[in-house]
Image (cartoon, helix red, strand yellow):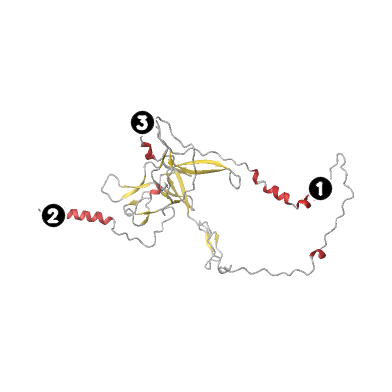
Amino acid sequence: MGMLVILAVLGVATAGLVIADCPVVCECPAVPPSCPPGISSVPDGCGCCKVCAAQLNQDCYEGQPCDHHKGLECNYGNDVGRTHGICRAKAEGRSCEYNGRIYQNGEDFRAGCKHQCTCIDGAVGCVPLCPSHVPLASPSCPAPQLVKVPGQCCLSIDCHKGTTVVPQAHSRPPPYPFLPYPAYPYSKLYPKPHRKPYPFKPKKEKGAMGNELLEVEREWDEARGNKHLIAWSKFEDRCAVQTTSWSECSRSCGMGVSSRVTNDNARCKLVKETRLCNIRPCSSVSIPVKKGRKCSRTHKAPEPHRLSYAGCRSARLYRPNYCGVCRDGRCCSPRRTRTANVTFVCPD
């Protein structure tokens, strides 16, 4: 009887510890956490409050998860009952080479004193550590400028107080001084010079250069110089637009990228454009093919859903079309594609 009582008490205590990990009612601070540059703000393990994510080789637990945007996960080792672990990179993450050094997937490093960089599955992403935009003028800072401070890496904002007066909001600029017109017309004050026409047109002698100045002046007087403006505006029409076809998607299933080269821009300069592509979801690879057929037909998503990429989700719902699959080794690819602008919402 005594053994049963002890087991019951231990069971209640253990249940109380499990429930105590996540509160019944979430109580979060009014001000969200201010994370350092390059560190994401993610929900805690209970899904209640935003916390600064733990980085590579840092301690992690339910209240401070690892930064999943960088491919990190909390490694508890072989002990299943542990509640604390260390943030490690996932096995499928690739390392990065930058400036002659190798960085592991999810590892943070400094590129000089102005950028904080992260290795994300073979690609290096950097965020600036220094201010690059000048703030708008205000009464407290009338003339903001970025100036170099000796001994500091980043440019500092200098307000130049007392040098510039900021006008009040919605105030009209001072009017221009009024200049009265003279009572007499300008034609009397500045008479137009009268040119006498040539009595005859000079003859062109053989082997001598002709005088074409008179003909050019007549053309200018008649057209008033508009021909030159029209000829200059037609210069933009000389750009022959060259656009290549979109390349095949980089992945046969799931989200990938496709690119093309075009000069269809204001500068008529060849640039590389990249778009996201999704031929088929990876879950559709296992769709059974109907009897008597080798490939499944093109199908539409069963219901509208939000597109996801790199931890971000689309602001609106989409129901895209997907290619089918073949069981004889052939790979189905889209014959016609359509590019749409998608707005993604990313967590802080």
Mark 2 Cα within 10 Å, few/some/many (few <14, many 20+)?
few
Q: Where is residue 96 in the image (x, y as percent from the top left)?
A: 44, 43
Q: Residue furthest left?
A: 1
SS of the residue at dot 3?
loop
Mark 3 Cα within 10 Å, few/some/many (few <14, many 20+)?
few
At horizontal 65% and vertical 45% (from top left) the residue drawn is 237
At horizontal 42% and vertical 31% (from top left) the residue drawn is 330
Name the amino acid type tagged 2.
Answer: Val
- Alpha carbon separation for disc pair 3 and 2: 63 Å
Residue 226 appears in view: yes
Q: Earlier in the sequence, mark 3 or mark 2?
A: 2
SS of the residue at dot 1?
helix
Residue 248, placed above or below residue 43: above
Q: Where is residue 68 in the image (x, y as percent from the top left)?
A: 38, 48
Labels 2, 1: front one? 1
| Residue marked by disc 3 | 291
At horizontal 25% and vertical 55% (from top left) the residue drawn is 19
Mark 1 Cα within 10 Å, few/some/many (few <14, many 20+)?
few
**Looking at this view, is 107 or 39 the one in front?**
39
SS of the residue at dot 2?
helix
| Residue marked by disc 2 | 5
Q: Earlier in the sequence, mark 3 or mark 1?
A: 1
Q: In which quarter of the image is the C terminus?
A: bottom left
| Residue marked by disc 1 | 215
Q: Position of residue 177 (x, y in %)?
A: 69, 70
- Alpha carbon separation for disc pair 2 and 1: 118 Å
Name the amino acid type tagged 3.
Answer: Lys
Q: Earlier in the sequence, mark 2 or mark 1?
A: 2
At horizontal 78% and vertical 49% (from top left) the residue drawn is 219
Name the amino acid type tagged 1.
Answer: Glu
